[in-house]
Every structure is written in C-alpha cells, then in structure tokens.
Amino acid sequence: MKILIGWLALSVVVSTHATGGNGNIAYIGPFSPEDLSIRKVVSDYESEVLDKRIFTSDWKLPDGKSLVWKKAVYKIDPALGNKQRMIFPEIQSLETGDVMVFHMKMKNDMQQHLRFIGDMKGIKSIFIDGKAIPGDHSNLPAGEYDLLLVYIHKQTHKEGIPFTIASALSGKVLPLLKFGLPEMGGQIELPAYGIGIVEFTVTNKQDGRPKPCRLYVYNEKGEPQYDDTCPDCFETFTCAGSAKLILPEGQYTYTIESGKEFVNAEGVFEIKNGKTVEINKVLGRFSNINFDGWYAADLHNHTTVEDTPLLMESENIHIAYVPWWWINPPMGRTSEKTLLDIEPRVKLPNNRFIDTRVGEDERWDATLMFFGMPEDIEIPNASWSSPPSVHFAKEFGAIDDVWVHLDHMFWWQTPAILASGELDSIEVLNNNFVHGGVNDTEAWGKQRDMGKYPHPYGNAEYQQDVYFKILNSGLRIPPAAGSAACVGGGPFGYNRVYAHVEGELTYEKWWQALREGKVFITNGPLLRTKANGQLPGHVFKADGKLSIATELELAARDNITEIQIIKNGEVIASISAKDWKSGKKLPDVEFDQSGWFLIRVLTDNAMSYRTALTGPYYVEIGENKSHINADDIKFFLNWAKEAAEQNIAPTEEERALFDNYSEETIAFWEELYGK
C-alpha cells in the first residue's frame, strides 16, 4: 500500500492514515527552521527549554487523542566537538500512533552523524535523495541535510525495538522525496515544503579569487540568519567566500563586509518554495593600507584556534590571539591551561600571527590581558574579589617580554594599574563600542558624570577623556583596541589598532611599533597622519616655540563629519570632511611649552559611535618634558581614594593585601600631585 503524508509549509500537523492492518502513522512536522536548526540546538541547549519547544505532550490527533512522549532522553556524542553535536529523542512509548515521522536539520562535516544514529537507534536502512546507501553508515557524504527519521513503535515492530529509517535531502530541496518503508509494505511521499536556498559567492575584484568576508542576513522580523557551517558571532557569520542558507519563504536583506578596506555589498532577496537564489558579489577596495606599512591587530578576542585564521583573513587582521586561560569566576571560567599542544606563536600565510599564550584576568576591579606568557608560569589562583588585579599586573609585568594590556578605562583598579608602571597599552576602543551602537555603561566600574557625559554616547566620550587625562598626567601609554569577540562587543576585528612597520612585517616589529606609539585606532575610518613628516608617537624636542604642520590620508565607508586636533586634552581646531576634500588643511599646532596632541575623526553613523584616533605626538620644550595638568592628576587621586573604599575581599589577610596596594596607589598619585 502506498502511504501519502502531506507536508504543509511552516505549520505543525499530526495526521493518521490507515495502513492495511499495520497500525497508524503519526506524523509531526515540519517545525520551524528556528526550532530545528543545529545552531540553535547547540548554542541554546537547555533540556527543559527543548522539552517545552519540541517534545511536548499536547500534539492533538484528529480523533482528539494526544501524542505523548512518556520519556525523552537526549543523546549527545561529545567526541564530535561543539560544532558536531546532535540531539535526538529516545522514544520509549507512544500512547497512540504506531509509526512517527520526525523531521529535523543536520550537518555531516565529519561523516559521523548517521553512523551515530545507527549505533544508538538501530537504523536498518538509509536513503539519500531517495537512493539507498549500501554498507556502512559512514558512507554518508559530508554536507547539510534535512533529516527524516521514521520510528516504528516497538509493539508493532517484530523485533520488539524502536526501528528507524533515516532519509536525508542533500544540496537543494527536492520537489519530491521517496524512500521505501519495507516493514510497512509501502512508501512515503513528501512533497516540497515552504523553504528554499540562498547561495552567496563573493570574490575579490583585485584577483578574482574567493573573498573571505562577514555576512549579515536578516528576515522580515529583523532576525539574523546563519550558514551553520561557518563561525558566527552575534548577528553575523564569516565565510571563506561562499555560503549557503536554507531559509523559510519570505523577504530577506543582506550586507557583506570585509575588514575596513573593502566596499560593502548590500541587497534584498526573496525565498520561494523549493527554489535556489544565487547571489554573486565582487568586493573592491577603496584603500590598501598594508601597502603603506600599516597592519592591524584586535587585542581582545575569545575565538578558537580553528576559526581565527579565517576571521583574520576576512578582516585583514595580522596580529591576534587565542586565549590560553581566562579567569572570570561568575561565568565559571577557570585557570586551567589549554593550547599547550599548539605552538606559542602560530604564523599563518600573508604574515599573520596568532599568540596562543595569552591570559585574561577579568574580575570585579579590572580586566587585564597578558601577552606572551611563559609556559612555566604559575597560573593565577584568584577569586572574584581577591587579590586585586594590580597584583597580577605587577607580578606578570615584571617578567621579560610579557605585555600588560588593560581593556577599559573605567575599572576601579585603573589608577593602581597606571601607578604600577607595568601597563604597556590600553584599549581606548573596546567592547563598549559595538557594531550597532554603544554599550553606554561602566558596568561595575567607576561611574561617569551623567551630566557631562549624557546618553547615548556618553560612555564613548568619557573613556576617551579618561585617556586624555592619563596623557595629561605625564604617562605615555599607547592607545590600543579590541572587540572581545565573540563574548561581548562587536564581531572580530571591529575595533582595531594599526601599527606602522617598515619593511617586511614580523611579530616583533609590530609590537615594537605599538610600544613606540606609531599607531592609530579605529572602528571605522582609516586615518594615517604625519606631523612635520613624522609618524604618531614621535617626540619633538625644541628650546623654544615650535610649530607643527600635519598632513593626513583618510578613507572610510561612513561619512566623515569632523576632523579634529586635540591638544593636551582639548579640541583646539577642526574642519569638516567636505572642507578637507576641497583642499582646506588643519592649522599648524603651536607649542611654547611641553605637551602632546593627536588627531581624531568623527562620523555620522546613525547606529554607532564610529571614530578613529592617532597615537599621541609628544613635544618637549625646556626642563619639564611633559604637560602636567594638576586637575587631571587630582581626578586619579580621588579615584584611587574611592577605590580604596571598595575593598570586598572576604578574609582579613586578603583585605590587608588590598589595603596595601591602595596605600601604594594613593601615595603615587599624591606624590605626582605634589610636584
């Protein structure tokens, strides 16, 4: 007998059909792609949530009876890794219905899934696109599939066990899928249902090769869509130049980005039942910043060894890292060493480098990164509240070649870490700056003056002003940037620091350029400057007055609204991008005593705070080599005194340690203020 099961688009249907004495067929499906997506199941996995979303007891049959799952057991094969896990129900009994067809999505990157199903579920037959796969289940080709499982109730099946027949649709959605059901003496036909495919192909205009890139795909509700074979980060995913998404019928928008140097591609498309939409885009450059010796790093990320090379290629990042250890007690992070089987420094094609010996200390009072940690170092044993972060800044900063990096301006321990003398760089652009806006909060750090720094971009302005106060205290610390992908902030490479390297790029030369301040930081515009022919970080020396002329190159996808000169923390001159393009120049910067200046550009991006800043230029005139602002030093002194009152260490010994560091910090700023 031939059994037909209607496949109704994007609805949940349970139907029964006579089977010539072999019992009833109960059919559940199709669920929405959001429910069935591997990405959703893996990333949002909570058994109670899934029970409510998928394995419920209230599916009604036409005769009014319920289809009941008396027990649902989730089967996970941990050997397959995070990207390969699959979850299936273990059906113990059905109150009604002798056979059930269950539909879900799967992908078979390691040719393991159906072998696993076979081991656990007793699959006797497998069909791909209607054709039986002979022999071992591992013959299933790699790819993405819509998987259909047919469960025969143990009371019906003569062997007394749940019997399953699996079938998969590979590549495109077929208008009709047939697979044999020999135990039932019939055949099931499944007409095409309300989904289709979009295939992206992206090439580089310069050489015609596939272009690694980042894609944003949204449905009509503004919900992000993904190619589950690609690494994703928040609302976006990165591909090597091609991507395929299986989507429900409807209208969609997309944006394709690649680093800061390529023109975006945008558009709309429509998914129709069973159809494939092909989108071919060529990305062209509007800047080739590497040609001029500028190379970028993202100095805060939480990516994997497997994904990072593709992300770096897509974003044109040359310096990155994969976390070795990460302390964050509330989030359950541990100090266990990992990555010891990976080289400390991985060199990729095109002179890209990954540091695999970076530790992150993220706790209540600060977040610090330590680059280039030696393998024999004792990993910190710390609680949320003790010891204070400055303890590790001093301990690890004293080790040769360890680079100490602070990720925000507003932490309670910022004055202490500055006073330690071990801080090498600081993120002026950090994960408060995100692709679609600004995280306008100081988290659990020192809160800003809301009257002076109001919403929506008060945090962005506050953090930059704190950096200017650091410079006004005579501390020459180069600015840096990081995105915290993909834990917080924007996608990988969104916030970045460019350093200028002469000749061939090496890992050591890049870090030396950062130390010398030959940098600019950006989350959008590409800003390259020279002052009297010198790069940022240069120290001008004079016996008397000094006049400095600036020149710049500027390229951006966003509209530039203003180009500013900031001298000793104050905007002293600005011109519009329109005036600059018409030939107007920034005025010379005049000094009659020591100080510093930098150049900043602002944009009119409606969604976010997009900016770029150069590293500071320094001017030394006379005996006093730095510009010192007493009010700014008093700002940090008061901050240090407030921080001293934040002692939350649980034991007397730990509290005493905190108090000792607080006394040292206050003494440092008092001495500086006294001078």
Image (cartoon, rainbow, N blue to C red):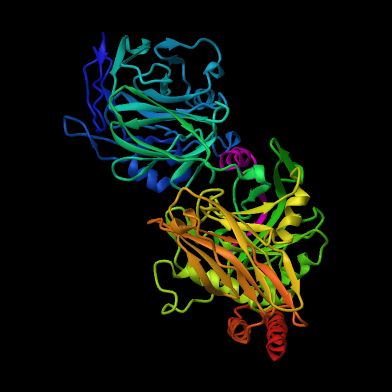
Relative to 380, residue 642 above or below: below
Relative to 445, residue 44 above or below: above
The C terminus appears in which quarter of the rendering?
bottom right
Relative to 266, residue 601 above or below: below
| Residue 197 visible from this viewpoint | yes
Q: Which residues are magenta?
A: 305-329
Residue 579 in picture, x, y percent from top left: 45, 58
- The number of numbered badges drawn on the structure is 0
- Residue 313 in magenta stretch: yes
Which of the pair 220/509 is nearer the observer? 509
Residue 207 in picture, x, y percent from top left: 58, 27
The answer to whether residue 269 is left or right of residue 245 is: left
The answer to whether residue 227 is left or right of residue 507 is: left
Q: Quadrant of residue 515?
A: bottom right
Which of the pair 169/623 is nearer the observer? 623
Which of the pair 603/191 is nearer the observer? 603
**Residue appearing at x 77%, y 64% in the figure:** 396
Q: Residue furthest left?
A: 63
Q: Residue furthest bottom?
A: 674
Residue 381 in picture, x, y percent from top left: 71, 65
Q: Quadrant of residue 399?
A: bottom right
| Residue 70 visible from this viewpoint | no
- Residue 454 in magenta stretch: no
The N terminus appears in which quarter of the rendering?
top left
Residue 543 in picture, x, y percent from top left: 77, 78
